[in-house]
Image (cartoon, rainbow, N blue to C red):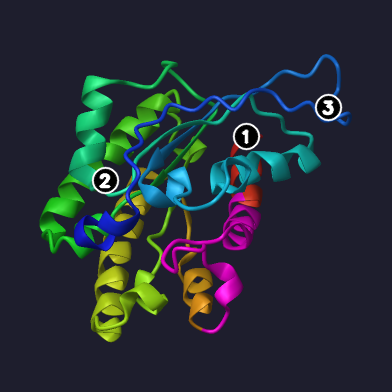
Amino acid sequence: MGKLLLPLCIVMAIGLACGKSDSANVPVAVSYKHMLALGDSYTIGESVATAERFPIQTVQQLMGDSVYFDGPEIIAQTGWTTGNLLNRLATAPPQRSTYDAVTLLIGVNNQFQRRSQNEYRTEFTGLLQQAIRYADNRPTRVTVISIPDWGVTPFANGYNRALIAAQIDSFNLINQSVTAAFGSNYVNITPISRQAASDGSLLAPDSLHPSGRMYQLWAAQIRPVMRASLR
């Protein structure tokens, strides 16, 4: 998030393949699916352990539904706007041409950097179209995740929290309407993010990003949506 993320920015442009689970519960002849997660610090899991990132917790939870993934592959970096993600995909595409599931969570840095909502709508639309192509042109295999509200965190002390909340809601109205127009799935985790105002266990040690516990709650909401889309 520009200035918001400078104190905790670790430059990471990652295509992460976490590998197949070694759980004893995985059938020997299982057919692994492939997942791509696109985004910013929330997708890369800034300030939490790798296993706590929401894409990884999501695929771990899906094992309980006998849905097994090889991955996920994560393309995300702290501080990225929609424009940054578009540029990254243009210069270094994902490892595979198609995936069984794709997630997209992007926009908090657009809000923080005071970039226009018109620009966000245009660039988010382009990203969603790419995500659908990565999902083998199956819109229902794409899950868009709403932007969390960083304004409830201790890091936001001195900022206008009400204004941040209103702007986050406005950006989420855009990504939700675009998602609906393309027929993809939408998961609203913003209310969960706002619980951090009264529950510090939902925040990472940097007092800004979600903790592994919050990401677990996100994954629990994403799990049934993704499971249904894979039928």
Crowding near the residue tagged with mark 1, few <14, some 14–19, many ≥20 C-alpha atoms within 10 Å: few
Question: Which residue position holds label 1?
Answer: 230
Q: Which residue is mark 2?
A: 80
Give 149 or 179, whichever is nearer the viewer.
149
Q: Amino acid at mark 3?
A: Val
Q: Which residue is mark 3?
A: 26
- The kind of residue tagged 1 is Leu
At x 55%, y 42%, the residue is: 55
Q: Residue furthest front?
A: 7
Disc 2 versus disc 3: nearer the observer: 2
> For the residue marked with disc 2, what is the amino acid?
Trp
Q: Is residue 228 visible?
A: no
Residue contact between numbered discs 2 and 3, judged by CB atoms under 8 Å: no
Q: Give whichever of 48, 104 is nearer the camera.
A: 48
Write the residue at 22% across / 35% down.
86
Q: Which residues are magenta?
A: 198-222
- CA separation, marks 2 and 1? 29 Å
